[in-house]
Image: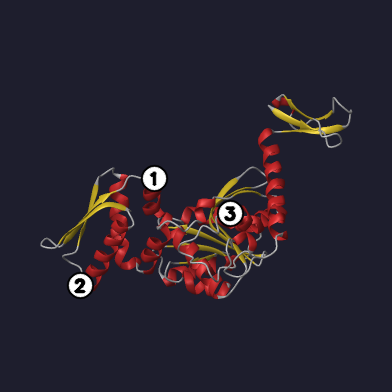
Amino acid sequence: MAIFRCNKCAHIQEQPDGQVGDTIACPRCANPAQVYGTLFFIGRLLDKYFEAQRELGRLKPPAAANGPGQTMATNPPGALESIDLSNTDHLASELQHGPIYDWFSRKQIQVVANMRGVDTTGFFDEVAVSIGSNLAVLKEVVERIRWAQQKEYASATIHLDKKVPADAQAISAFCQQLYDFSFVAKCFHNRPEKNIRLILQTAPAVRDFFNGEWLEWYALMSCLEYAKERNKRFSCARNLNITLQNGEGHELDVFMLIDGKQPICIECKTGEFRQNIDKYLSLRKRLGIPGRSFVMCITGLSDEHAKGLTAMYELAFVNERELGAHLSHLF
């Protein structure tokens, strides 16, 4: 059913779906008003509710530094001096996302934020940083786990016999980290045969992580690191769902807003990306984001290839090694 709400007397009633978009007279006061689709009406109602919540948060007096009960709601977005970025749920709030909602609202774009996407109280961020910081060595482990999960295998074996000692040690330490943080169910170090056998977890969140979501966590943590280092006010989101005016939907992997006005969007790709370039070019223009601030972070891309693609398109192409350097220029 559709919804009719009178702007004069606030009368509300249901209407047939076929009347969506029609203007009818209010049965109570005869004032003409429009009939809205239910989802649209609820969406606008929630926008107003969260806007009021954010305004209340802004009006609250600031708590004393490091005082009891201090939260992100009593600090400007990005006030993380006393917060451990790798272990906090302070970012997972409507208030923290508020400036992002406002920025998109001004462009008449609907937004649905994933609060869990920026909750770092789990271990996804730590493992992602381990991978992104040493992908050349750890890529084989990630790919073997991903492949085994797709094939519905119960385990994956990592061979170390042809690895140089430093790489073998790094892989062993990483596999142990996966077990310590429960990304795998068991980890057997078979030293005589020089391999490691991993018994896999089947949880969807873990499967998604190895299927490419780790790069999103790595990009998010890279952004947070630079924002804190440069003492910037910011709001951030991961897996941000947006709906354009024409009804077209997109999911933004990582989105950060600096000082409420400077957007940074990072799209993360661990596989083929070329077929999506036109889509992201169009989206960048629709959002009005400068090319250097719409970042395509692609694993395995050479520095030379990234430089060439950046020169060809109005997008910034980087690999995971150069992401930090590029962000340093944006911040």
Which numbered disc covers residue 93?
3
Residue to which mark 2 is pinned? 165
Residue 163 located left or right of residue 131: left
Crowding around mark 1 (Cα neighbors within 10 Å: few <14, some 14 to 19, many 20+) is few
CB atoms at circles 1 and 2 under 8 Å apart?
no
Disc 2 secondary structure class: helix
Which comes before the other along the chain, label 3 or label 2?
3
What amino acid type should be assigned to the residue bearing mark 3? Ser
Disc 1 secondary structure class: helix
Residue to which mark 1 is pinned? 204
Measured as percent of width and height from the top left, residue 65 is found at 60, 70
**Furthest residue toward front:** 68
Front position among marks 3 and 2 = 3
What amino acid type should be assigned to the residue bearing mark 1? Pro
Query: How far apart, in angstroms, are the residues tagged by discs 1 and 2?
Result: 34 Å
The correct choice, above or below, for 202 with respect to 159 in the image is above
Tell me what residue is drawn at x 22 percent, y 68 percent: 168
Tell me what residue is drawn at x 43 percent, y 54 percent: 213
